[in-house]
Image (tube, rainbow, N blue to C red):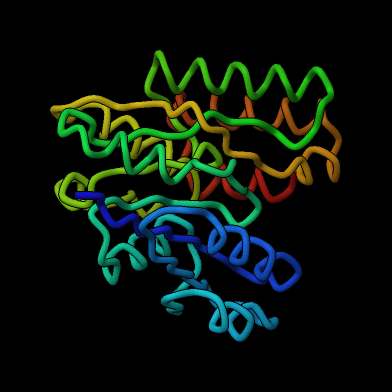
C-alpha cells in the first residue's frame, strides 16, 4: 500500500512565489496532501495559499516551530518538509513512495541542484550531496523526509533560531534504520547567492556552520545570518 505523503511548507511573506510552488506540488504525481504553515505573514500569502493547499494553518514564526506545528495536523505516514523556494523533478514523490515502502528506510532527502549553472554553485550542490550521503548531515533545502512515527519519537525539530535541520538530521541518523538520498533532484533557488554575492554567501554559510560547531548560540547565529 502506498504511503500518504504530507508535504509541509513553512512560509512567511511569500506572496510572490506561493502560487507557483503550490501549483507545482499539486501537479506532481503521488499520494499526497499539501500543508502550508504560515508564520505571521503580513502580505497575501495566507489568502493565496488557502485556494491551493489542502490545509493552511497559522502559528508564530520560526522554521522549526512551523514545521512541528504542521506535522501535528498532518495525516500522512511520511512527513516531507519543503522550502517555499524549492521545487522537484517530475516523479520525485513516486520515488519517495516506493522507497518508503521499504521498512528499513526511516527517512532521508533528495539530491540537491541549485538553480544556477555557475561552477561555484555546482560545487556547493555536489559537496552538499556528498555530506548528506556519507555523513548524514542534511539541510532543509535538500528536502528532508521522515516516517511520522520516527519524527514523533524525536519530538520533531528542535525549535531553535537556526541549524534546526542539522540537529534534526543528526538525531535522525542515530535511530534504528537507514537514511536514503533519492535519485530525483530537488532544485533550490539561487536568489540568496545572487542577492548577496556568491562568494560572500558561501563564506557566510561556512562561517555559521563553524561557529555552530564551536557552540555559538543559534540566536546569535541568526543575527549573523540576517546581517549577511
Tell whether 63 sits left or right of 170: right
* Residue 7 picture quarter: bottom left
In the image, residue 221 lies at what x, y percent?
56, 42
Residue in the foreground of this view, choosing between 207 and 95: 95
Residue in the foreground of this view, choosing between 183 and 200: 183
Q: Looking at the image, which residue is at 14% across and 47% down? A: 153
In the image, residue 147 lies at what x, y percent?
23, 45
- The number of discs equals 0
In the image, residue 209 lies at what x, y percent?
54, 28
Q: Can you say whether 184 is above or below 15 in the image? A: above
* Residue 201 picture quarter: top right
Q: Looking at the image, which residue is at 52% across and 32% down? A: 184
Quarter of the image for the C terminus: give it: top right
Residue in the foreground of this view, choosing between 141 and 33: 33
Tell whether 196 sits left or right of 49: right
In the image, residue 54 lies at what x, y percent?
43, 75
Tell whether 192 sits left or right of 179: right
Q: Can you say whether 175 is above or below 53 in the image? A: above
Q: Looking at the image, which residue is at 44% across and 31% down? A: 138
Q: Looking at the image, which residue is at 48% across and 18% down? A: 131
Amino acid at each position: 500500500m502506498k504511503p500518504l505523503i504530507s508535504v509541509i511548507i513553512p512560509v512567511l511573506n511569500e506572496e510572490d512565489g506561493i502560487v507557483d510552488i503550490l501549483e507545482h506540488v499539486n501537479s506532481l504525481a503521488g499520494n499526497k496532501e499539501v500543508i502550508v504553515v504560515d508564520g505571521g505573514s503580513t502580505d497575501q500569502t495566507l489568502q493565496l495559499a488557502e485556494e491551493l493547499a489542502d490545509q493552511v494553518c497559522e502559528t508564530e514564526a520560526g522554521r522549526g516551530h512551523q514545521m512541528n506545528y504542521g506535522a501535528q495536523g498532518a495525516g500522512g505516514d511520511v512527513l516531507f518538509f519543503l522550502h517555499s523556494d524549492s521545487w522537484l523533478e517530475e516523479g520525485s514523490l513516486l520515488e519517495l513512495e516506493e522507497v518508503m515502502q521499504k521498512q528499513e528506510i526511516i527517512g532521508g532527502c533528495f539530491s540537491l541542484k541549485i538553480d544556477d549553472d555557475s561552477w561555484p554553485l555546482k560545487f556547493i550542490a555536489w559537496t552538499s550531496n556528498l555530506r548528506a550521503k556519507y555523513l548524514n548531515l542534511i539541510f532543509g533545502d535538500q528536502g528532508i523526509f521522515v516516517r511520522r512515527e520516527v519524527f514523533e519519537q524525536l519530538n520533531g525539530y528542535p525549535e531553535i533560531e537556526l541549524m534546526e535541520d542539522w540537529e534534526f538530521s543528526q538525531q535522525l541518523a542515530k535511530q534504528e534504520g537507514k537514511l536514503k538520498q533519492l535519485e530525483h533532484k530537488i532544485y533550490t533557488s539561487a536568489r540568496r547567492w545572487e542577492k548577496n554575492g556568491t562568494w560572500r554567501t558561501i563564506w557566510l554559510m561556512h562561517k555559521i556552520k563553524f561557529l555552530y560547531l564551536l557552540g555559538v548560540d543559534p540566536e546569535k547565529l541568526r543575527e549573523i545570518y540576517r546581517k549577511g
